[in-house]
Image: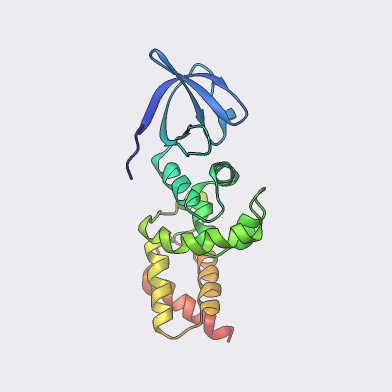
Amino acid sequence: MYFLINSITGTVNNCLDNQIIINCNAFSFSIFTPHPSSFSMGTTVTLYTILLWKQDSDPQLVGFSTIEERNYFTLLTECSGIGTKLAITILESADLQNIFQAIVNEDISFFKNIHGCGEKKAEAIIFELKKKIKKHPIILKNSECNTNFSYEIRRDLEETLISLGYSDKQIKNAINEVTSSIKSEKNPSFTNILRTAIQYIGKNI
């Protein structure tokens, strides 16, 4: 994706309810961003930005601390009914790894409980991002998410269980169980992960 203003580096001049003011040389930028209160006045920061310019509204500059966070904002705003404000609210509600995990696990309640989201928008996020996220794999960090699963391992496990003829519900429950049961293991092999999933399904038929 092309970004007209890819990033801005400058000094934080003010922190407002939903934006910060950054001084950069002779310019001063108002940038909408998640967690504006987390920035400290007088510090030098770099924000990765998106310039939003729609016919029915004034231009907005939205900025993020990481490129990954900006990518997720872009994905969220491509979903039906998800605008700038709600996308930022979602990003403020949880870290990216937890958002990723909620999408992969089809956890509607995770998004439904976010202010302004609701069940229909939660379903839209999961339905639309479940497909798109395959082009944006994110490695889950063990220390932050209590799981040793990367996106690729989860995908391979799901595809293998599908090929073995298990139902979507059985696969979803098995993956949730395996994620929990092997979280203490370091670098578990795919064979052990698959065996654990099949054993779980066998016990719960």
User: Which residue does the image show at 53% across and 25% down from the upper left?
Assistant: 20
Q: Which residue lies furthest to the top in this view?
A: 26
User: Which residue does the image show at 46% across and 62% down from the upper left?
Assistant: 185
Question: Whole-percent x and y of residue 44?
Answer: 43, 21
Question: The C terminus lies in which quarter of the figure?
Answer: bottom right
Q: In which quarter of the image is residue 3?
A: top left
9 or 145, which is in the foreground? 9
- Please state if 82 lies on the left or on the right of 3 as rendered: right
Question: The N terminus lies in which quarter of the figure?
Answer: top left
User: Which residue does the image show at 40% across and 54% down from the upper left?
Assistant: 139
* Placement of 62 over or under 166, stated as above or below: above
Q: Residue furthest left?
A: 2
Question: Whole-percent x and y of residue 167?
Answer: 51, 82
194 or 121, which is in the foreground? 121
Q: In which quarter of the image is residue 148?
A: bottom left
User: Which residue does the image show at 41% across and 85% down from the upper left?
Assistant: 164
- Please state if 7 lies on the left or on the right of 106 as rendered: left
Q: Is residue 18 visible?
A: yes
Q: Is residue 183 visible?
A: no
* Placement of 133 over or under 205, stated as above or below: above
